[in-house]
Amino acid sequence: MIGPAVTSDQPAVAALDAACFPKDAWSSGSWADEFAREDRQILVAETPPGDSATPPGDPATPPGDPATPPGDSATPPGERSTPPGESSQVVPTADTAGPGSMLGFVVLLVPAAAEDPVDLLRIAVDPAYRRTGLGRRLLTAALEHHPTRTVLLEVAAGNKAAIGLYRGFGFREISRRRGYYAAGEDAVIMQRAGEDS
Ligand SMILES: CC(C)(COP(=O)(O)OP(=O)(O)OC[C@H]1O[C@@H](n2cnc3c(N)ncnc32)[C@H](O)[C@@H]1OP(=O)(O)O)[C@@H](O)C(=O)NCCC(=O)NCCS
């Protein structure tokens, strides 16, 4: 289930961030700032409320998308709303109520001025759920809100997984910052043009 982050997601998002970016995780203060800012769009992928996170391939996992069980359709009162294009939601019952497990997130900086580019600041998927299409689904859900806007991002040159993901969305390298990262690795700046450009 993918939807806008709510305040109570902050600790789980920060924990997943720390697991996915051990060398440059954002501090809890930074995450509080991200959650508070109006120019941020944060989407999260979670297991349905009450479900435990069971990695794909585990015999207990039913077939299909782990974050979007088939057949669920309604958004329950008080739950996050569904962004356009996301159709699968879960209705918690008394038996299943409770927080789901955080499987992934994406953070965009969306300037109010429509002519300014959107920045993709962060995307991550729980290592146990990678290569299941979740990163693609998160990015699809985030970008479909901004079809006409230019989107920029920065990625380490050696991050083949992320670069492969971005290329699949039409991002192309536009420049490089040589030796930008602490280990001397280049930063690659990628851009995706809006539909009208
Ligand atoms: C980058 C990341 C978000 C991808 O998430 P994911 O859920 O595994 O990606 P998906 O399963 O949706 O894969 C989508 C496409 O990305 C590319 N890709 C993903 N993982 C890849 C890998 N290990 N090697 C090469 N390409 C890869 C492929 O093109 C893939 O399409 P395919 O499966 O049809 O070949 C995930 O690897 C991650 O969290 N990495 C650590 C955090 C990070 O580096 N974030 C980006 C910098 S901000």
Image (spheres, rainbow, N blue to C red):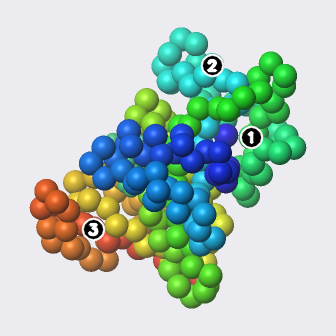
Residue assigned mark 1: 88
The answer to which of marks 3 and 1 sits earlier in the sequence is 1
Q: Quadrant of the N terminus?
A: top right
Q: Amino acid at mark 1?
A: Ser
> Is 48 situated left or right of 157 in this image?
right
> Which one is in front, 167 or 3?
3
Q: Marks 2 and 3, how far apart in space?
A: 38 Å
Residue 98 placement: quadrant: top right
- The spot of residue 91 in percent (x, y) is 82, 33
**Contact (Cβ within 8 Å) of mark 2 with mark 3:** no
Q: Amino acid at mark 3?
A: Val
Q: Secondary structure at mark 1?
A: loop
Residue assigned mark 2: 62
- The spot of residue 61 in percent (x, y) is 58, 18
Q: Secondary structure at mark 3?
A: strand
Q: Marks 1 and 2, how far apart in space?
A: 15 Å
What residue do we see at 61% from left, 37% from top? 46
